[in-house]
Amino acid sequence: MTETEIRALLAAAVAYDNRRPSAANIAAWHEAANRARWTFHAALDAIHAHYAESTTFLMPGHITTRLEQNETPPGPRPTPRCRPPHPPTKPPANASWPWSATGSASAPAANADQLPSRPNTSGPAK
């Protein structure tokens, strides 16, 4: 990371905690960033995430820890779950709405755009 990027990261932290970075702070953060191989956008995201969840004064170690937690472990990625390619051809045995009275899945009932009515459960009518 460049010194300019470090200054931008510290500016983001200043917005949250009113710190007053000095040349020594910039040098220390630059050293930590290079040792831990931060990237600017990931480190900036870690700063925002830190202050969204914590009131602890941010240190370079907090950023490194967050970046390490967000790394994807090596190996195969899980297969994404997908929806079935086609809708069911027949309605379930106990279905009545929105299927038509004939039980055909190809033509919805005339009232398919309406919600079924709810029974009154508020108690006896007065």
Image (spheres, rainbow, N blue to C red):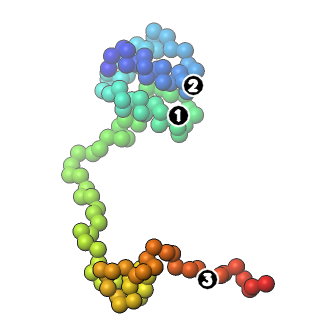
Circle 3: residue type: Pro
> Which residue position holds label 3?
119
Q: How many marks?
A: 3
> Which residue position holds label 1?
51
- Using the numbered discs, state the Cα–Cα distance from disc 2 to disc 3 in whole angstroms: 55 Å
Residues 120 and 67: in front is 120
Horizontal placement of 49 versus 122: left or right? left
Disc 1 crowd rating (10 Å Cα; few below 14, some 14-19, many 20+) is some
* Pair 1/3: label in front: 3
- Using the numbered discs, state the Cα–Cα distance from disc 2 to disc 1 in whole angstroms: 9 Å
Residues 81 and 17: in front is 81
Residue located 40% across and 82% down the image = 109
Q: Earlier in the sequence, mark 2 or mark 3?
A: 2
Residue located 41% across and 33% down the image = 45
Residue located 56% across and 80% down the image = 117
The residue at the far left in this view is 76
Q: Secondary structure at mark 2?
A: helix
- Percent coordinates x, y for residue 74 in the rendering: 23, 45
Circle 2: residue type: Asp
Residues 36 and 50: in front is 50
Circle 1: residue type: Tyr
Residues 31 and 78: in front is 78
Q: Earlier in the sequence, mark 2 or mark 1?
A: 2
- Percent coordinates x, y for residue 61 in the rendering: 43, 29
Quadrant where the image shows the N terminus: top left
Determine which quarter of the picture holds residue 23.
top left
Horizontal placement of 69 versus 88: left or right? right
> Which residue position holds label 2?
17
- Using the numbered discs, state the Cα–Cα distance from disc 1 to disc 3 in whole angstroms: 48 Å
Q: Secondary structure at mark 3?
A: loop
Disc 3 crowd rating (10 Å Cα; few below 14, some 14-19, many 20+) is few
Q: Secondary structure at mark 1?
A: helix
